[in-house]
Image (cartoon, rainbow, N blue to C red):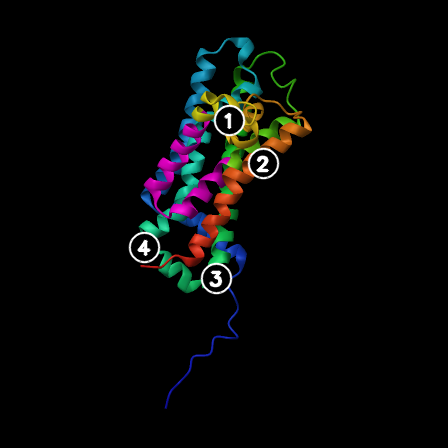
Amino acid sequence: MTTTLDITGTDRVPFGRLVGIELRKSADTRAGRWLLIAIALITAAIMVIFFAVADQSDRTFSNFMGIAASPQGFLLPVLGIMLVTSEWSQRTAMVTFALEPSRTRVIAAKTVAALVLGAAAFAAAVVLGVLCTLFGGAEGAFDQVDLGTFATFFLLQELTVLQGLAYGLIFLNTPAAIVTFFVLPIAFSIVSSLVTWMHDAAPWIDLGTAQAPLFEGAVDLSGEQWAQLATTALIWIVLPYVAGWFRVLRAELK
């Protein structure tokens, strides 16, 4: 007599639990744990160094936030990449998809987890920036701070971590994703700066160029600048993300 296991009445894993699992995975491996520690320590260290060497008049909250954007801009993409690739390099993807057969839900959970980690990095930078400014900031160090200042920095952090996640989805390999993430945009920016006919088009096709006003602290972007940012984000983040999504859906588990 053959017995059939009926699981049609089994509830799906709650999406919130999937997100929580992905967040826990980010610190489960030694590399992931040290990456999270490095993001916090390097952000704090560079703020302290700036505090020590900057003139009193330059110790403003906006400058502290701008300083924090540099190390986090390099490390957050790696965090996004490893949210995806660590499972494939550690060969735990088979377990993940066995417990949650819907790869789409797993990718969505990884995406939300990446956004949460980006928000956590943003919050940490804000707290450190406030502490440094209160401890020895310039007179009127918070005068030019408004909601736009926070929104600009937050947007940069989230775009950066999502771009890393997209490259991780495409390559499913940590070294390949990291090298491509850092080399391809830089190479493209160099080419666009050298080729004359690409100068005018650069803000529309180069993400670094389109993000430059945000890195400079601008909060009142024009409609054209927002359109440029949206177009380049589509090219460098959304399209790779969609391509990576389909790659994972068709990837063979080994």
Disc with the residue nearer the chain's start (4 vs 3): 4
Give the CA separation, mark 2 to mark 3.
30 Å
Which residue is label 2 attached to? Answer: 231
Circle 2 SS class: helix
Q: Are marks 1 and 3 in contact (CB under 8 Å)?
A: no
Q: Dot 3, crowdedness within 10 Å: few (<14), some or many (≥20)?
A: few
Q: Is residue 15 visible?
A: yes
Whether pointer 1 and pointer 2 mark residues with C-beta atoms closer than 8 Å, the reply is no
- Characterize the local packing of mark 4: few (<14), some (14-19) or many (20 or more) Cα atoms within 10 angstroms: few
**Considering only order in the chain, which callout, 3 or 1, is on the residue closer to the N terminus?**
3
Query: Dot 3 corresponds to which residue?
Result: 102
Label 1 amino acid? Leu
Element type where label 1 sits in the image: helix
> Viewer-proximal residue, 235 or 129?
235
Locate residue 88, reporting x and y percent.
35, 52
Q: Amino acid at mark 3?
A: Ser
Asked whether the residues under the numbered discs 2 and 4 touch, taking CB atoms below 8 Å apart as contact, a structural biologist would say: no
Residue depicted at 44% across the width and 29% down the height: 188
Residue 80 on the magenta segment: no
Q: Is residue 254 left or right of residue 239?
A: left
* Nearest to viewer (mark 2 / mark 3): 2
> Mark 4: which secondary structure?
loop
Of badges 1 and 3, the one in the foreground is: 3
For the magenta stretch, what is the residue range?
160-189
**Among the two numbered marks 2 and 3 on one chain, the one whose residue lies closer to the N terminus:** 3
Between 211 and 14, the residue placed more toward the observer is 211
* Residue at image location 53% in from the left, 37% down from the top: 159
Q: CA distance from mark 4 to mark 1?
A: 37 Å
Rendered location of residue 29, percent (x, y) = 34, 46
Res. 26 in view: no
Give the labeled residue for mark 1.
128
- Mark linked to residue 91: 4
